[in-house]
Image: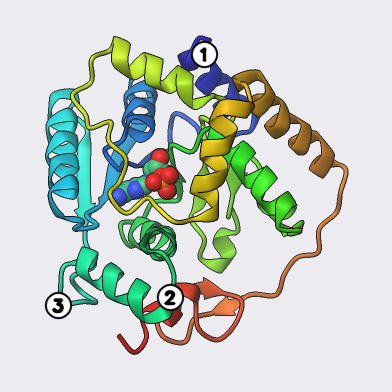
Amino acid sequence: MDIEKEVLRTVEKYKLFEKRERVGVAVSGGKDSVVLLYILKKLGFDVVALMLDLEIGEWTKVHVSNVSKFCLELGIELKVFDFREYFDDEFGEVLARIAKDKGISRCSVCGVAKKWGLNYFAKKIGLDVLATGHNADDESQNVLMNFLKGNVEIGSGFGPVSGSRSDLGFVKRVKPFFFVPESEILKYSRKMKFDILYDKCPNAVGTYRIELREWMEGNVSDEEKVGIVEGFMDKISELEFERKDVGFCERCGEVCRGEVCGFCELVSNI
Ligand code: AMP
Ligand code: ZN
């Protein structure tokens, strides 16, 4: 698969962004987001890299250092954020404490924090659109995971564009790798010899998603993954979803359904 072409096709077909727009790329230091940043720059888009320093020990330090070098070499502006305005401790420590107190996995806590942080910091620097490295493997997992859990609500936000209600304070989030299998991104990254870390996050254990991903690796082919994503896209285009009532979190001001958002709820009383 020519993933550069596929990215361009998705960007154009789903109107993710245009050449005149400044596009934030959420970069973790992993292959997906690094390859995405590289390809968008190569295609001539005006990109700025946005990275959350999650302070998960040496693992994060290596990622931040790799991304800094990568951006310097390519002449891409990099903005690194951390959670120090909220917590005195390293975020990795805070994560561990929350997970222990609330009886949930660190990976789940981190997922909520990343989603919150990316929207919050992207808005803070005035970005209207933020691209992430989510790929067809992630998205087919979403479909199956929600199906298995009996949750059909995923439908309303499923697609290469989500959270585009800027009237509500959502930065438009886009996924140019929506139809690209992870194996193709890995192949590209290896071929380009990008100097990055391929190890999994040390906290990536103990979630339903991780178990499902491992099962899918041996049982679902790339074609089937893309088929799941495309099939679901077709299906939901025929459906109508109710627009949910949303408000603003009384603590941080971010959009949320109840009075307090998921992130503020998690970090309360710690
Ligand atoms: P993950 O949730 O780790 O599967 O990552 C999914 C996507 O979220 C990545 O492809 C990145 O675009 C973004 N992302 C994950 N971690 C970070 C981070 N520390 N800083 C910025 N973006 C991130
Ligand atoms: Zn909040």
Residue drawn at x 19%, y 24% as measured from the top left: 74
Q: Is residue 22 left or right of residue 139?
A: left
Labels 2 and 3: the sequence-earlier one: 3
Q: Which residue is mark 3?
A: 88
- Comparing 266 with 107, the one in front is 107
Q: Which residue is mark 1?
A: 5
Mark 1 is surrounded, within 10 Å at the Cα level, by few (under 14), some (14 to 19) or many (20 or more) other residues, namely: few
Q: Which residue is mark 2?
A: 103
Horizontal and vertical percent for residue 59?
Answer: 18, 46
Q: CA distance from mark 1 to mark 2?
A: 44 Å
State yes or no: Cβ of the residue under disc 1 lies below 8 Å from any atom of ligand 1.
Answer: no
Q: CA distance from mark 2 to mark 3?
A: 22 Å
- Comparing 75 with 239, the one in front is 239
Q: Is residue 257 left or right of residue 262?
A: right
Q: Amino acid at mark 1?
A: Lys
Is any part of residue 110 visible from this angle? yes
- Answer whether labels 1 and 3 touch (C-beta < 8 Å): no
Q: Secondary structure at mark 2?
A: loop
Q: Amino acid at mark 2?
A: Gly
